Amino acid sequence: MTHSDPSRTVRLYGTEEPPAEERVLNAGPLSVLFDGANLRDVRMHGEEAIRAISFVVRDKDWATLIPKIADLIVQQDGDRFWISYRAGVAGNGETFGYEVVIEGSAAGVLTYSARGKTPTGLLTNRTGFVVLHPIEGVSGAPATITHTSGERVETRFPVEIDPVQPMMDLREIAHRTPGGLEVTCLMEGDAFEMEDQRNWTDASYKTYVRPLALPWPYRIEPGEVVQQKITLTVKGFPRAPSRWAGGAAVLTLGEAEGTMPPLGIGLQPEDASAALRHVETLHQLGVAHIICHHDPRRGHDAESLARHVEVAAALGAQPWLEAVVEHVNDAGAAAEIDFLGKLVAKLDRRFATVLVSPAPDLKCTLPGSVWPAAPAPAKLYAATRTAFPGSRIGGGMFSFFTELNRKRPPTETIDLVTFTTAAIFHAGDDRSLMETLECLPHIVRTVPAIARGLPYSVGPSAIGLRDNPYGEAPVANPTNIRQAVNFNDPRQRGVMGAAWNSAISLPSRKAARRPSRSAARSARSAFSPCRRRFRSPGSRARANCILFGTSCEAWRNSKAVRSVRCDRPSPGRCEGSRRLRKKAPSYGSAIPRPTRWKSASPKASRPLQFLMPHLSLRHPVNRICSTA
């Protein structure tokens, strides 16, 4: 194998690591996907009841430790399946081993039990079960919850993305599927609570073990036994049979129906020199703006600002400044911003847009926790406007949508709202990555409630994480594998990344009904599809832009986009998705909505190339296309 002759696996996924093998197990009308360790896609009579059930071990930085499986036994007959195995994880010199037994019956009862302990002790943020409820057809639906005290309460799954836990102190959750199945999930061994995973673009509501109000990370002592059990009971028949017929989904390009948003790229100062060496390649992205990151804590200075502007000029793009403010008091922050403004005034080109964020806001503050000291947002934005006259001032979060949702900026003092996203914070497998596309319309319908009529822009985003708001750093991933919290995720360089990048703009644009402005991760970095290690002849000319379109401002210089159609509807949710689209509120009515988006630039007339590999997934492709 040479660098100029990558394997098919590398072309598709950017890594020689093969895709996870999934096995469908059936017990009468009950079916599950077993991925070698956990359960996915739990269905009854073909309708999805639960998205996933997993036993996870997460380290002090929230990275999910990958288990090594031993003594795996899988048995099934017509009315029953049974799985058992031993598993072990290791990290930071600590180990944890556990035994799993899973059993499913034709009566619609599924049990999943785990028992484990550690010989070394284990510092962990979470060790135990996680249950994922789907979002399509479940968002806004009634639910009956049973608390650990035995009290039963009627509630609903949230429609708008909930910044805090919508359900707490849980022992059991009961709900009905869109087709009418009765689903009851009993969780034993500890107290559980739910978070709205749509905050991180996960297409699920996640019920997890151990409340976040308790201290974390916490330590499991040597010899201490962790024992938990999930019992899922599904009753009834769907009102309509499942429309999923198995087999591969076929995608075809439709007619041009709108325009792609103006796209940008993110630039770190350390990547500026490499970007200038590859200007010809980067020109092919046709970027409209470059988001230039500036953090004085990392030694960024006047020279790094000048390099940012030089790259923007070389690419013919607008420079945007993404400035981290180090000082946490109002006076210090104002002085720091004033000094930054004077540095920028000496440059040959000004920043059209200036985004600011206090350094403490780069890290997560969990619900119920005390926010760390930081400048008052209104005062910080006012100081920024004074220091950068004529520039558009933006606020929000340089981290995930989650943090924006939990700490909403005062919109009366800024001109636009910003946040970023990534696809693999909670899970690193191919299926979970592609399922994030299902969540994007939900984010697009929630952001306007935060922006309150302002335009909003999604900052540098990709499959992997540029920063980790919940730990010290993303996972460096030197072995180039699939895993959660990767900084350098291999799929960003493969055809799977191209498919995800292309598809990610479609549901957002359709839900927002407006063109969008978004930014890719980096001009030239470990995320670049042009990375030398996996480059084949001519691959730089086919460099994939990292898309995430959710802005509501009508911009010019947009690329034409074709619609994508699927010949097989998503099982049990196609009609519901259509109804959801018809009833979706139209936000930002003060901003005129064009009846047809047109390109104002000759270079923007090229059609978007939509690439989709043959994936070993059951039907996430349908979820990609369900809003197209």
Image (tube, grey):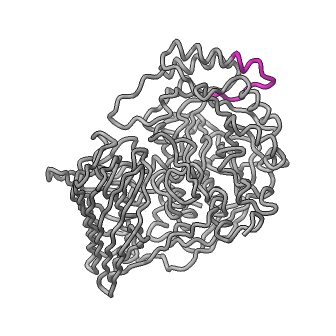
Question: Which residue lies most toward the left here?
Answer: 150
In the depicted structure, whether residue 45 falls above or below residue 187:
below
Residue 588: image location, x then y, percent: 56, 39
Judging depth in this view, the residue of 326 and 2 nearest the camera is 2
Residue in view at x 70 percent, y 55 percent:
529
Residue 256 in sight in this render = yes
Q: Which residues are magenta?
A: 342-355
Snapshot quadrant of residue 239: bottom left
Residue in view at x 56 percent, y 62 percent:
624
Residue 555: image location, x then y, percent: 71, 40
332 falls in the magenta region: no
Point out the image quarter for the N terminus.
Answer: bottom right
In the image, 34: left or right of 352?
left
346 falls in the magenta region: yes
In the depicted structure, whether residue 607 falls above or below residue 368:
below
Point out the image quarter for the C terminus.
Answer: bottom right
In the depicted structure, whether residue 54 falls above or below residue 92:
below
Residue 171 in sight in this render = no
What is the tally of numbered marks visible in this picture? 0
Residue 538: image location, x then y, percent: 81, 61
